[in-house]
C-alpha cells in the first residue's frame, strides 16, 4: 500500500471535490482508467482516511438568522483526546484547530442567533471544554470560502499514532475501534489505546 498520492489519486480527488456525486463510470472515463481501477482507488483513499466522507456543502449565508464566528482561546485542558470527544458533540463547532501563539484554540462556530453566542461561549466552551481568555470575531461578509484541499501528485501521506502522537514513518497499523479508524505506530500502541478506551467505559 503506497504512502503517497500519485497522479491518478490526485486526479480522482479533484473530480470528487468538484462533484461528490460523480458516478464511478464517469470517473473512470474522465481519468481514462477501467471501472474496477477507479473503484479500487476510491476505496483505498477512503481506507487510508484521505477521503473522510462524502457530504453536502451548504451556503450558510442563505439560511436566515445564522451567525458565524471565529473564536481564539487559551486551552486549559491538556487531554487532547478528551477535548476532541467533547468538541465532537457540539454541532455549533464547525471546525476546531490547535494553533501556535498565546491562544492555542481556534474555533469556527455557527449558531442560530447572535444572542446565543455569549451563552454558548460561557457555558459550553468555557465550562465543558475548559477554554478561557476568548477573542471573538463575527463574520459580517464572506468574500471567499473554499472547501477543497489542493492535492498534488506524489504528495506524501502523514500519519500520527492515535495513542502516543508520534509521526508514523512507513505503514501504520490500522484498526477500527468503536467504529472509528485509528492509526498506530505499532501493535503495542494499539493495545495500550484499547486499554485506555476500555477504562473510560
Image (cartoon, rainbow, N blue to C red):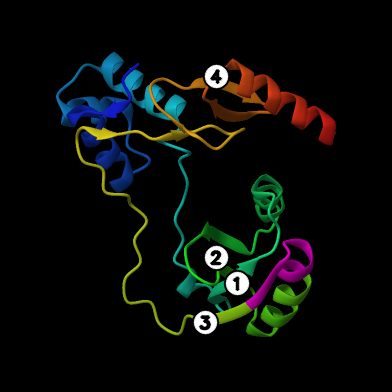
Give the crowd class for mark 1: few <14, some 14-19, many >=20 residues within 10 Å: many
Disc nearer the start of the sequence (1/3)? 1
Q: Which residue is mark 3?
A: 138
Question: Relative to the observer, which residue lies in front, 117 or 37?
Answer: 117
Give the crowd class for mark 2: few <14, some 14-19, many >=20 residues within 10 Å: some
Disc nearer the start of the sequence (4/3)? 3
* Residue 121 percent across, percent down from the top left: 70, 75
The answer to whether marks 1 and 2 mark residues whose Cβ atoms lie closer than 8 Å is: yes
The residues tagged by marks 4 and 1 sit, at their Cα atoms, a distance apart of 34 Å
Question: Relative to the observer, which residue lies in front, 11 or 59?
Answer: 11
* Residue 3 percent across, percent down from the top left: 33, 25
Tell me what residue is drawn at x 18 percent, y 20 percent: 33
Residue 129 colored in magenta in the image: yes
SS at badge 2: loop
Horizontally, residue 49 falls left or right of residue 113, namely: left
The answer to whether marks 2 and 4 mark residues whose Cβ atoms lie closer than 8 Å is: no
Tell me what residue is drawn at x 67 percent, y 79 percent: 117
Task: Report the span colored magenta.
Answer: 124-133
Which mark is on residue 182? none
Amino acid at each position: 500500500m503506497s504512502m503517497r498520492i500519485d497522479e491518478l489519486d490526485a486526479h480522482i480527488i479533484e473530480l470528487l471535490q468538484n462533484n461528490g456525486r460523480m458516478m464511478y463510470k464517469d470517473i473512470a472515463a474522465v481519468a481514462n482508467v477501467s471501472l474496477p481501477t477507479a473503484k479500487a482507488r476510491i476505496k483505498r483513499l477512503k481506507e487510508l482516511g484521505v477521503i473522510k466522507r462524502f457530504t453536502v456543502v451548504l451556503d450558510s449565508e442563505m439560511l436566515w438568522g445564522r451567525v458565524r464566528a471565529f473564536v481564539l482561546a487559551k486551552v486549559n485542558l491538556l487531554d487532547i483526546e478528551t477535548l476532541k470527544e467533547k468538541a465532537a458533540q457540539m454541532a455549533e463547532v464547525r471546525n476546531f484547530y490547535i494553533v501556535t501563539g498565546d491562544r492555542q484554540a481556534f474555533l469556527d462556530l455557527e449558531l442560530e442567533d447572535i444572542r446565543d453566542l455569549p451563552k454558548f461561549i460561557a457555558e459550553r466552551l468555557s465550562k465543558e471544554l475548559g477554554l478561557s481568555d476568548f477573542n471573538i470575531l463575527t463574520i459580517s461578509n464572506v468574500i471567499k470560502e473554499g472547501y477543497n484541499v489542493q492535492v498534488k501528485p506524489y504528495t506524501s501521506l502523514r500519519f500520527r499514532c492515535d495513542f502516543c502522537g508520534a509521526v508514523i514513518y512507513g505503514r501504520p497499523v490500522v484498526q477500527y475501534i468503536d467504529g472509528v479508524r485509528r492509526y498506530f505506530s505499532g501493535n503495542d500502541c494499539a493495545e495500550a489505546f484499547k486499554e485506555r478506551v476500555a477504562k473510560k467505559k
